[in-house]
Image: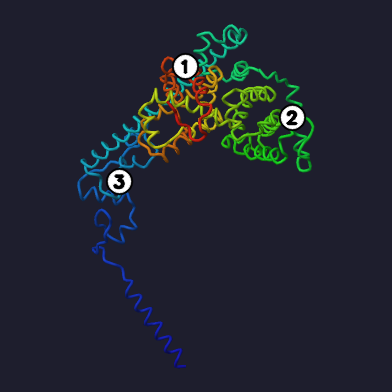
Amino acid sequence: MAAPSLLLLTDRSLFAKKSKDTRPLEKSEPGWKLFGKVPLRDGLNKDPKKIQKEYEERTGRPHSSPSKQSVRKYLDCEPLSTTALILEDRPANLPAKPAEEAQKHRQQYEEMVAQAKKREIKEAQKRKKQLEERCKLEESIGNAAMTWNQEILPNWETMCNSRKVRELWWQGVPPSVRGKVWSLAVGNELNITHELYDICLARAREKWKSMPTAGPETDNEDPGISLADREASLELIKLDISRTFPNLCIFQKGGPYHDMLHSILGAYTCYRPDVGYVQGMSFIAAVLILNLDTADAFIAFANLLNKPCQMAFFRVDHSLMLTYFAAFEVFFEENLPKLFEHFKKNNLTPDIYLIDWIFTLYSKSLPLDLACRVWDVFCRDGDEFLFHTALGILKLYEDILTKMDFIHNAQFLTKLPEDIPAEELFTAIAAIQMQSRNKKWAQVLLALQKDNREQERGSPVLKR
């Protein structure tokens, strides 16, 4: 019985101590708040309106509750942020803002609203300008398309070389007629028909099916082309298609244009087994597919690659390639002597950057819409414009390139900026003079071709 008695005694003493500690505080005992002293216990139970009333009686400063109209009269253009809170009056249980502080906050808020209005007006003006430019561009494209359809295309043979048409060509062919214009400009010297394309495509499909078991030679194929070479071409086609305009996601497997691109490249390997497939062809075929039907794209593709410059590069005719590089350097030195000397000092030869540009006709190196505009003038002027465009790119970035070393120059030229301004580039191209000592491109190229037939193979160096 001793233990329960001890426990009872302990409980009683504990409760007695607790009742002693929890005695109510006197009203005079103060408690601290953020903006002044208020009674700790009574302040917690009082109504905020009573607290405000007592405060007004003590200070003698009446405090009128702010009206919603006065507080929000500046909030019509208020930015969506918490900055407008500086205009709000303090809660009713706190002292009002001093006049100076309220004035300062109002001034700050008005400044913020003014800045927000300025930004909004500036952005609205920018959007309006962009919309006007877009509408103007669409209107000009529509008018140009009408001119091409109604005046030029029906009278192609008589008007294609007129001054008016050449100026329209320079401004860019409207997308709606681009394919037709390209087909007419490239021509069909090879006399390829739709039926021939179907035959080549059927042979390609048969070859794809029988390739694992086929012999090194089949009927109607070049005996000099080995099975390994044909297999390599077909495998390279598959690999390159997956890397053709990957951002568009339309030529990769499962895309809407995958089979079309595969068919054109396969048909071409059967049409020209001596050339086969070479890396870069997929980009040229892809651009044509975006503007022409499949059979017409194949016809234009085969005729484009049959041009002297393209055939020299795709058949890797070193001697002729060196001649093109040498001709390019003649006009390079003539137009951009400072950059020419800088490249020469750093041993940066044209083959480092020109090969990729020529192989893909700039479709891989430039933004697609800009590349199509380059193609427009290329179809008008021929191979010369490919090198003319190269000089225009060098002129556009001359200031940057002259400050770089070999490695950075090579990296820059093999991966051009993605935001090249079209008008600035064509202005730079127009500033290039494709005439050296009263000789035009074709004359310089022919003279060099005669002089350099026995030139050593290697890096292109202009011999004078």
Label 3, on which residue? Answer: 90
Residue 143, percent from left and from top: 53, 12
Residue 354, percent from left and from top: 50, 31
Q: Residue at x 37, y 82 (%)?
A: 13
Q: Is residue 269 left or right of residue 49?
A: right
**Mark 3 near mark 1, Cβ–Cβ under 8 Å?**
no
Q: Secondary structure at mark 2?
A: helix
Mark carried by residue 201: 2
Nearer to us in this view, 309 or 247: 309
Q: Residues within 10 Å of mark 3 (few under 14, many from 20)?
A: few
Position of 216 relative to 323 (above/below): below
Please report whichever mark, 2 or 1, sits nearer to the chain's N-terminal start: 2
Q: Residues within 10 Å of mark 2 (few under 14, many from 20)?
A: many
Nearer to us in this view, 369 or 186: 186
Position of 321 relative to 43 (above/below): above
Label 1, on which residue? Answer: 440
Nearest to the eye among marks 2 and 3: give it. Answer: 2
Nearest to the eye among marks 3 and 1: give it. Answer: 1
Query: Is any part of residue 362 visible from this angle?
Result: no
Q: Residues within 10 Å of mark 1 (few under 14, many from 20)?
A: some
Identity of the amino acid at label 3? Arg
**Mark 2 near mark 3, Cβ–Cβ under 8 Å?**
no
Identity of the amino acid at label 2? Leu
Identity of the amino acid at label 1? Lys
Q: Secondary structure at mark 3?
A: loop
Q: How far separated are the C-alphas under marks 3 and 1?
A: 82 Å
Q: Residue furthest front?
A: 454
Q: How far separated are the C-alphas under marks 2 and 1?
A: 41 Å
